[in-house]
Image (cartoon, coloured by chain):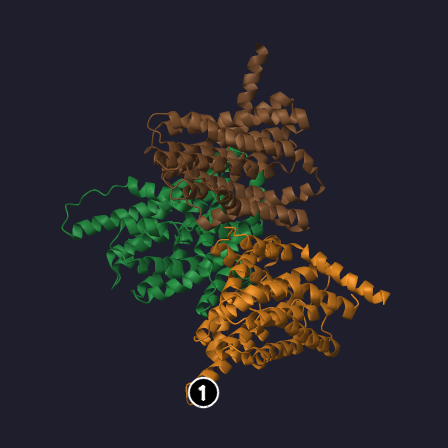
Chain colours: A green, B orange, C brown
Amino acid sequence: MALNMDVLLGFFHTFLTQFQTPTLAFLLGGMLAAALGSKLDIPDAIYRFCVFMLLMRIGIQGGMEIREGDIGAMLLPALFSAVIGMTIVVLGWLTLARLRGVRMDDALATAGLFGAVSASTMAAGMFMLEDEGIFFEAWVPALYPFMDIPALVLAIVLANLYLSKKNGGSGQRVAIWPIVKESLQGPALSAMLLGLAIGLFTRPEVVFEGFYDLLFRGLLTVLMVTMGIEAWQRLSELRKVAHWYIAYAFVMPIVHGLIGFGLGYIAHLLAGFSPGGVILLAIIAASSSDISGPPTLRAGIPTANPSSYIGSSTGVGTPVAIAICIPLFLILGQAVFDL
Amino acid sequence: MALNMDVLLGFFHTFLTQFQTPTLAFLLGGMLAAALGSKLDIPDAIYRFCVFMLLMRIGIQGGMEIREGDIGAMLLPALFSAVIGMTIVVLGWLTLARLRGVRMDDALATAGLFGAVSASTMAAGMFMLEDEGIFFEAWVPALYPFMDIPALVLAIVLANLYLSKKNGGSGQRVAIWPIVKESLQGPALSAMLLGLAIGLFTRPEVVFEGFYDLLFRGLLTVLMVTMGIEAWQRLSELRKVAHWYIAYAFVMPIVHGLIGFGLGYIAHLLAGFSPGGVILLAIIAASSSDISGPPTLRAGIPTANPSSYIGSSTGVGTPVAIAICIPLFLILGQAVFDL
Amino acid sequence: MALNMDVLLGFFHTFLTQFQTPTLAFLLGGMLAAALGSKLDIPDAIYRFCVFMLLMRIGIQGGMEIREGDIGAMLLPALFSAVIGMTIVVLGWLTLARLRGVRMDDALATAGLFGAVSASTMAAGMFMLEDEGIFFEAWVPALYPFMDIPALVLAIVLANLYLSKKNGGSGQRVAIWPIVKESLQGPALSAMLLGLAIGLFTRPEVVFEGFYDLLFRGLLTVLMVTMGIEAWQRLSELRKVAHWYIAYAFVMPIVHGLIGFGLGYIAHLLAGFSPGGVILLAIIAASSSDISGPPTLRAGIPTANPSSYIGSSTGVGTPVAIAICIPLFLILGQAVFDL
């Protein structure tokens, strides 16, 4: 009993410590500033540049380490990533889409965004693991597209099948390749793939250390402020749609993260996936897309209301993933793996 | 006599040395480039990002040091800051507003802007003190709003009372809170307050040193080039209004700085305010707002002509504050405090 | 014979190594991303800021070293730079302009752009020489305007004489000073001249090392990605004009670079111009303008079709200069000077 109390106290202590890390503090600071009506704004060009820098850094590092790494070890986690992405969409279809006042196409678009991945949440998770000195394989961030693309594809395919059936259509086939291509060509995935290629095939060590890695943490804080402001603004859009979106966006990142943690743990047992990798996979699963997902969905499910899916993801899902899921899965990992 | 000659030579030497410091050199370089018709321009997004970075750095540092500091020592300087801000407005009302061809509302708007504070002039002053190795309390930059807000509020209230009386109005009350709120919500003060909160309540040491502080001096030079270009362009607008504005904008920063120095010196005697703090307070008093003040004034005194107050402040006041007042009050401080 | 084989193998080895340097890799990466339809984009504000930073860094360094340097040594290379710039225009007039389907004014505008200089190609060349540890005089980048301006002036004068004659005009004089002024006032040359002045007359060592030089290599990689994307997009414009432009833009950078290398070698023999300086002069000669040249030409030869000259320079000339000429002249210099 006394032990349980200690565990609980330790939990709260770790939790509160995480709130003092710059990443969370800047996110909450941005939200607070927006809530207080501040005219603070980060120019859009700076925001897009931060995203580019972040993903190049993640990509280059991944590429450099894959060069010497054992790529076979990536197979099971990559497969599990695809399973997680698709499970999240199916879960959304079984839960959110059945609720009163929720339209099927809006629900599927929302589930697709929650199955997709947020580069900045992932970066914040990597930052936290590095800070705690917890090792993870450098290729873990490269699991991103393996979760992102199946989730978006499945959501768009299901929505179009539904719309086609509803409109009395002949159940025409939905082309999958254009959705995959659109995802890979988006600015976020493109930057990460470009970085991967540069890390794999060239010798970028000097610019990596003296520029991309040097500015990484700082630019992440700028990004967090921007995302905090954006989250607050998007939150108000959610008032226009059914309240179920708020409940879904608040609870499901935790559920998705637990699924990620569970499958990651199986990969740990079967293929020696590192504890840090399991934690990061849970964070990636908990994250919902805010940069690359929305344009793909807008093109793929044009009838869906962006207020519902962007509001849920950017307004609630991302803050929950960063402020709750990151410390939560760190604590869970530390408990499970005795780190 | 020989001693006086030495003092004078020493004065000119210090003065010329300051012109070689990057801050001044980049400001004058920007003005020169604009004067020669250069198409050199710093994109607006970069300018706004530099301002954000500068004020976050100032805020975070202030917050981190206040954490361990003696906040009671700030009371008298904060009170004096408010007195300085309001004295500047009253002075403008007694001088500029009485001159031939100067409209009362234009004069009050101009005096309000000169009572308000320029974050970049303040940053340039901090940079110079750090370079000279002169200590100042880390909370001195946090005096900013204590001078800025009373000046803007008093200028807007006086202008509205005047306009209301002129229009035969019933002397309706001017709401003060919206002006205070507008000031606090502006991008400059918001960023500094956000930085303060982050410095106070979290542990941002790593990103502070590795990002905000690392880039501070360099981004200040970029800001100085932009402000030099802007100053030259605004100068031409001043030709459209009464020439008294040029005289006011050239002379008054020195007068305002002397008032700041005098009250700072009293705080030094009464409450142990540091010599570096006295110099920085004089520089803050000498500065005139260029980022956050103009929109507040535009909303608060809509009848005033922006060419008069923005032209005076950005075109003449800021260059005088940076290029003349910063070295002047450094020399004065060194002489008075025997630094 | 065995020796020749070794030389050839060494050549290919050096060549392939250069492809792994970050500069080239990022350029090719940007082209590849654009070719694959990626929506990766670097905001225009960031691109312009990178150019500003690059040229300030080059200018400041040049200014700081000229301070202690022997400016007399610059005379012959400066004269040769002007000769190279004008020779390139005359060569274009003798070759490209005579080809079937090529309009005289388009050809002269194109030749003017190839005679003018690309700041980013020059920076990539400097980067490579610094990496290889090959010394060059710090004033070599300051040869830029001595080649740039004569080329643009001659191209515009020749085109206007031709147009005036064609239109039965009286052969009116073309004003040269406005073209020179326009070039000097362009954002690229302005930034370099501002940097030169700051390096010459002030003490910018701290911000130079801690900011401009620190970020130089990293920002160059960002610029290379942008230029790669831009090159690919411009390439498609070339399809609309005569195919001769592609041939010209592919072959002539090498020819221009050889002329630069030859004259540089003469300066080496006559005036002790450094081997690194000879290589850099060849790279400057091989480069074609992409930032400052086009607006000057658009104003100076309004009848010329921008698709022809911008397409040739940005779409083909710059990639050839960076990816082929930089390694080529490095190898040539190493062979000739036994470095």
Question: Between A90 and B240, which is closer to the camera in this rendering?
Answer: B240
Taking the image as drawn, is residue B6 in sight?
Answer: yes
Outermost residue toward the right in this view: B2
User: What secondary structure is found at the residue carrying circle 1?
Assistant: helix
Q: Chain of mark 1?
A: B
Question: Between A308 and A7, which is closer to the camera in this rendering?
Answer: A308
* Residue at horizontal 44 percent and vertical 51 percent from the top: A48
Outermost residue toward the front in this view: C170
* Residue C60 x %, y %: 62, 45
* Residue at horizontal 57 percent and vertical 52 percent from the top: A131
A16 to the left or right of C295: right
Question: Between A193 and B230, which is closer to the camera in this rendering?
Answer: B230
Neighbour tally class for label 1: few under 14, some 14-19, many 20 plus, Cα within 10 Å: few
* Residue A168 x %, y %: 13, 50
Q: Amino acid at mark 1?
A: Lys
* Residue at horizontal 39 percent and vertical 58 percent from the top: A314
How many numbered badges does the structure rendering display?
A: 1
Task: State the residue position of label 1.
Answer: B165
* Residue A265 x %, y %: 45, 46
A297 over A231 or under it: above or below: above
A289 over B105 or under it: above or below: above
A290 to the left or right of B34: left
The quarter of the rendered structure image containing the N terminus of chain B is bottom right
Taking the image as drawn, is residue A72 in sight?
Answer: no
Question: Which quadrant of the figure has residue C83?
Answer: top right
The quarter of the rendered structure image containing the C terminus of chain B is bottom right
* Residue B41 x %, y %: 50, 52
* Residue at horizontal 35 percent and vertical 34 percent from the top: C166
